[in-house]
Amino acid sequence: MSSDRLTRADAIRIYEKVMHDVLGISDASHPLRVALDRDGVTSLITLLSLSSNDIENLSYLPEQVDGDPIPRLTKVNAGHRGLIRQFQAWIVFLGVRSGGGTLTLEEYENLSPDAFDDFRISNATTSTQGTLPTVGSGASPRPAVSTATYTAHDFKNSICREPTLILSSRMTSIGTTGTVP
């Protein structure tokens, strides 16, 4: 009897397939692969469970070449971090599209680089500008969060700093009764 569940052994095997075939990271010394290995990402389960913060902080030690100083921890470039984010979004998208929220073992085994590339250039990613599809009743993307921020500096600048205006405002609110409303 064959199981439809993703086992740990399956997750490791499919991770290798994803890295080599889907993401095109076949060289074990590739910076993204080294960074993922350094952070203990060795299966599809751990790859999919990386948080945005984990992805943002992926780093590796470059190989030391003769005459070079001691290698320093180097952050994985933005393009490769984005590749991981897009892969995670694709898996969520596929789960929503299949109606179950999660993929079956067969669906994981059938992941292809062409389908991933189609997703990356489709409206599913380009029209939402970085928002991920959510698992739910439909494949509609989450609403984009406003990028406008209101900083403490803006708040301080919005407060009236003129003491005479503050005093006259307070006097107006006191009125003739002499008590603050």
Image (cartoon, rainbow, N blue to C red):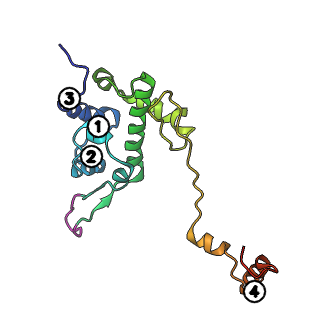
Q: CA distance from mark 1 to mark 3?
A: 18 Å
Circles 4 and 3 in contact, beta carbons < 8 Å: no
Magenta-span inclusion, residue 67? yes
Q: Quadrant of the N terminus?
A: top left
Q: Which residue is labeled 4 in the image?
A: 164
List x then y, in percent, for residue 49.
31, 42
Q: CA distance from mark 4 to mark 3?
A: 72 Å
The magenta segment is: 63-70
Q: Which of pointers 1 and 3 lies earlier in the amino acid sequence?
A: 3
Circles 2 and 1 in contact, beta carbons < 8 Å: yes
Judge the density around disc 1: few (<14), some (14-19), many (≥20) Cα neighbours within 10 Å: some
**Which is nearer the eye, 148 or 137?**
137
Identify the secondary structure beneath mark 2.
helix
From the viewer's perspective, is the residue at label 4 or at label 3 nearer? 4
Magenta-span inclusion, residue 52? no
Identify the secondary structure beneath mark 1.
helix
Q: Amino acid at mark 1?
A: Met
Q: Which of pointers 2 and 1 lies earlier in the amino acid sequence?
A: 1
Q: State the predominant SS element of the stretch in magenta.
A: loop
List x then y, in percent, for residue 10.
21, 29
Q: CA distance from mark 2 to mark 4?
A: 64 Å
Q: Which residue is labeled 1 in the image?
A: 19
Q: 60 left or right of 125?
A: left
Q: Which residue is labeled 3 in the image?
A: 7
Q: Amino acid at mark 3?
A: Thr
Q: Residue at x 44, y 31 (%)?
A: 93
List x then y, in percent, for residue 2.
20, 16
Q: Amino acid at mark 4?
A: Thr
**Which is nearer the eye, 157 or 175?**
175
Q: Which of pointers 2 and 4 lies earlier in the amino acid sequence?
A: 2
Q: Which residue is labeled 2 in the image?
A: 33
